[in-house]
Image (cartoon, rainbow, N blue to C red):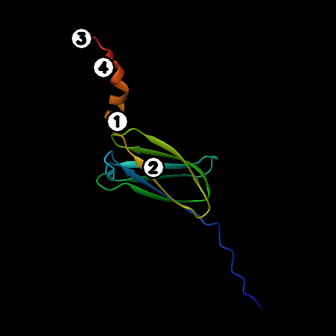
């Protein structure tokens, strides 16, 4: 008689979110990552400490997720991730300092100002 294996629960996907700076180095300022199921289901939040490399790991059921990254002194970043059953996914998010974002947007104003 053949033995039956017990049914495994649905395998969770693993999403790793790594924050990097403009030079591609680990971002070490305080940061928060929020992961929300796009179907209105589960929401997870993780926070990192200042001075530590910001790497977050989430175990999630298969589905689509909105990921929001907030870091001290940086513009919020958002992305959407689709995860399959048991998938191992890694996303590197480049954190842009707030002053860099403002400088890019102010370029036209500065170029268009009049000299007195």
The residue indicated by pointer 4 is 110
Which type of secondary structure does the marked residue at label 1 adopt?
helix
Q: Earlier in the sequence, mark 3 or mark 1?
A: 1
How far separated are the C-alphas under marks 2 and 1? 17 Å
How far separated are the C-alphas under marks 3 and 4? 11 Å
Q: Residue at x 31, y 33 (%)?
A: 99
Residue 33, labelled with which disc? Answer: 2
115, above or below 54, in the image: above
Viewer-closest of 111 and 71: 111
Dot 2: few (<14), some (14–19), or many (≥20) neighbours within 10 Å? many
Quadrant where the N terminus is found in the figure: bottom right
Q: Earlier in the sequence, mark 2 or mark 1?
A: 2
Quadrant where the C terminus is found in the figure: top left
How far separated are the C-alphas under marks 1 and 4? 18 Å
Q: Earlier in the sequence, mark 2 or mark 3?
A: 2
Which type of secondary structure does the marked residue at label 3 adopt?
loop
Residue 31 at x, y = what percent? 38, 48
Instruction: Kindly give the residue lying farthest to the top in the view shown.
Output: 116
Residue 83 at x, y = what percent? 58, 56
Which type of secondary structure does the marked residue at label 4 adopt?
helix
Q: Earlier in the sequence, mark 3 or mark 4?
A: 4
The residue indicated by pointer 1 is 98
């Amino acid at each position: 008689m053949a033995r039956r294996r017990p049914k495994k629960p649905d395998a969770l996907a693993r999403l790793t979110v790594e924050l990097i700076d403009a030079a591609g180095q680990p971002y070490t300022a305080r940061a928060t990552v929020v992961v929300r199921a796009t179907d209105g289901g589960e929401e997870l939040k993780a926070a990192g400490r200042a001075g530590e490399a910001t790497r977050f790991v989430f175990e999630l059921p298969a589905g689509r997720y909105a990921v929001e990254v907030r870091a001290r002194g940086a513009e919020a970043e958002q992305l959407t991730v689709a995860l399959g059953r048991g998938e191992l996914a890694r996303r590197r998010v480049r954190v842009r300092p707030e002053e860099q974002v403002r400088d890019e947007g102010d370029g036209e104003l500065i170029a268009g100002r009049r000299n007195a």
